[in-house]
Amino acid sequence: MSTETGTHDPVEDSRASFIEHLTELRNRIVIILIAVTAGFAISWMWIEEIFTFLLIPLQDAARANKIDIDSAQMYHRSLTEHFFVLLKTGVYSGILLTIPVSLYQLWKFIAPGLYPDERKVVVPFVVMSTLCFLFGSAFCYYLIMPYAYGFLLGFADNITKPQLMMTEYLDLSVKLILAFGAVFEMPIVTTLLARIGIINYKMMLDFWRYAVVLCFIFGAMLTPPDLISQLLLAGPMMVLYFISVGCAYLFGRPPAEPTPPEEAASTP
């Protein structure tokens, strides 16, 4: 903001810049919400088919483990639960359908802080991020969920008759799908951070032992309580981490060379 002497007030300038960033963030969020609403409206037309699609891993697990298929049926506690579960399914589907829009808006928000040549990778960023998320979700749906659900159903088969509730099943399934989708974004996020200069491949190589431990911790937190399911998440996470190191080496900024001691001593 200019004063009467023609100078600028740094406090007012920073405040105006902060307000501009908040306005930009609000606009991006509004666009994402509109896109998710449109995705929800599209999903609602086939909402029962979508929920039935989510049940396939559970039913396949029951058949593969020779468990009574009635053990894989869904129940609801109240008259409203069925409606609200389908409503949540539509919201999750809308979010999944509009991932490219959300990623594009995220990129447009952070792009002003990047160099001109870095802004040109918007299309590859959106495409690769979407593909990585979908690949991770498909990996979970076709490999992790059938095994994990079969393992859990096997415990109840000889002891009690399970009565599976729609809400709990939807929450667990969505948690797994989103977790695997997010994990498979690791190379994309790493490449972006390396391009900005926040991290580099040497830092990641030095951190690899801690990264392996964190992979197993996240694997235990995000999967059902059996060792195989945890390994099926921790294993890909470790592979993705080292792929991320390669991406940081190929596409990131080179690490800064340390200043020789004699030059550092001579610097006033």
Image (cartoon, helix red, strand yellow):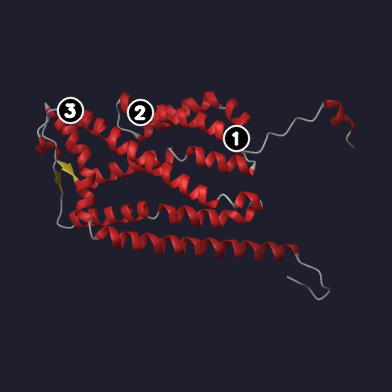
Q: Position of residue 197 (x, y in %)?
A: 65, 41
Disc 1 or disc 2, which is closer to the eye? 1
User: Which residue is under mark 1?
Assistant: 250
- Residue 17 on image: x %, y %: 65, 63
108 relative to 154, above or below = below
Q: Residue at x 53, y 60 (%)?
A: 25
- In which quadrant will I find the N terminus? bottom right
Mark 1 or 3 closer to N-term?
3
Residue ID for mark 3? 154
Mark 1 vs mark 3, foreground winner is: 1
Q: Position of residue 260 (x, y in %)?
A: 81, 27
- What amino acid is at disc 3? Gly
Please name the amino acid that badge 1 sits on.
Leu
Residue 27's x, y, as percent? 51, 65
Mark 2: few/some/many CA within 10 Å (<14, 14-19, 20+): some
Q: Secondary structure at mark 1?
A: helix
Of the pair 70 and 49, the residue shown nearer to us: 49
Residue in the image at 17% along x and 29% along y: 64
The C terminus: image quadrant: top right
Residue 265 falls in image quadrant: top right
Mark 3: which secondary structure?
helix
Task: Tell me the residue at 56%/62% (across/down).
Answer: 22
Question: With 92 as the anchor, is 18 left or right in this view?
Answer: right
Q: Which residue has dot 2 on it?
A: 232
Q: Secondary structure at mark 2?
A: helix
